[in-house]
Amino acid sequence: MTSIKDNIANINLQIFNACQQAMRSAKQVTLLAVSKTKTSQMIEQAYLSGQRAFGESYTQEAVEKINKLQKFTDIIWHFIGPIQSNKTKLIAENFSWVHSIDRIKIAKRLNDHRSSKDTPLNVCLQVNISGEKSKSGVTVGELYDLVNVIQECEHLTLRGLMAIPEKNASSQSFEKMQQLFIELQKLHPSVDTLSMGMSGDLVAAINAGSTMVRVGSAIFGAREDK
Ligand SMILES: *Cc1c(COP(=O)(O)O)cnc(C)c1O
C-alpha cells in the first residue's frame, strides 16, 4: 500500500501535468483532500505532507475531527455533502467553505447562523448538470434565482459552482459547467471557483477549467460510502 504522502505527491503531479496539457498554470488548481469516513490521524498525515484544504460530507463526523485537529489552525475545512436544514448551524459554525448549496432555504439558514464576528462563509452552488433525478443540485434554470438570494446574504460570499457529473457523460457536462462558470464570473467579480473533478476524472475536469478538484479515494484509499 502506498502512503498518504506518496498519494498526495502523485495527485499533485497529475494536476501539474493536466494543467500543462491544458496550457494552464498549476497555481490555478487547488487540491481539496476529501477525508470523509477517514480518521483524524489520516488527516494529520496529509497535513504533515503539506495538504491544507480538506473536504467533509457528514456533519457530525466532520465536527468531531475538526475539534480534534484544532491545533492545526491553518487547515481550511470545506463542506461538500448534502445539507439537511437541521445541520446548517453546525456547518456555518465549523466550516470556511460550503460547496453543496442547492436550495434557497439552506442558503438563508447558513447566512443566519454565520456570526458577524466571523469572516463570511465562502459558498459554491451545486448544479445538477447531468439532470439526474437522484442527484442533488439546482437545475440550470433555477441557478440564477439562487445566485440572487446569495447576493443578498451578508454573511455569504459567492465563490462559484460545484458539480458531480454523471460518470459517462462527464466531459460534455464539464464543458457545460465551464460555460455557466464563465457567465457567472462576468456578472459577479467574487466568483473564482469551479469545483469539479474527483479521483477518476480530474484530468478531464482540469481540461474544462476546474479550479478545485475534490479527491478522496486516490489519497486516502477506498471507502465504504454511507
Ligand atoms: C466523496 C466525494 C468526493 C471524492 O470522491 P473520490 O472519487 O473518492 O475522489 C468528491 N466530491 C464529493 C462531493 C464527494 O462526496
Image (tube, helix red, strand yellow):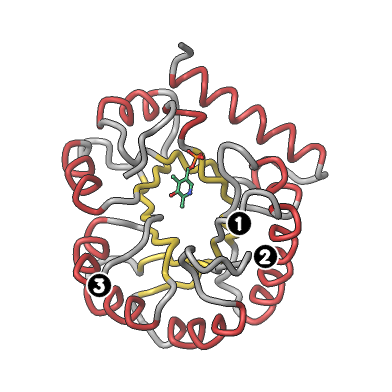
Residue occupied by mark 3:
85
The answer to the question of whether label 3 and label 1 lie on touching residues, with beta carbons closer than 8 A, is: no
Q: What residue is shown at x 17% (from left), y 37% (from top)?
A: 68
Callout 3 secondary element: helix
Q: Earlier in the sequence, mark 3 or mark 1?
A: 3
The answer to the question of whether label 2 and label 1 lie on touching residues, with beta carbons closer than 8 A, is: yes
Using the rendered view, name the quadrant where residue 107 is placed.
bottom left
Q: Residues within 10 Å of mark 2 (few under 14, many from 20)?
A: many
| Front disc: 2 or 1 | 1
Q: Is mark 2 within 8 Å of ligand 1?
A: no
Distance from the alpha carbon under mark 2 to that under mark 1: 9 Å
Q: Count of labels shown?
A: 3
Using the rendered view, name the quadrant where residue 208 is placed.
bottom right
The answer to the question of whether label 3 and label 2 lie on touching residues, with beta carbons closer than 8 A, is: no
Residue type (three-letter) at the residue carrying disc 1: Pro
Residue occupied by mark 1:
165
Residue occupied by mark 2:
177
Residue type (three-letter) at the residue carrying disc 3: Ser
Q: Is residue 201 left or right of residue 125?
A: right
Callout 2 secondary element: helix
x, y percent for residue 8: 51, 26
Q: What residue is shown at x 33% (from left), y 82% (from top)?
A: 105
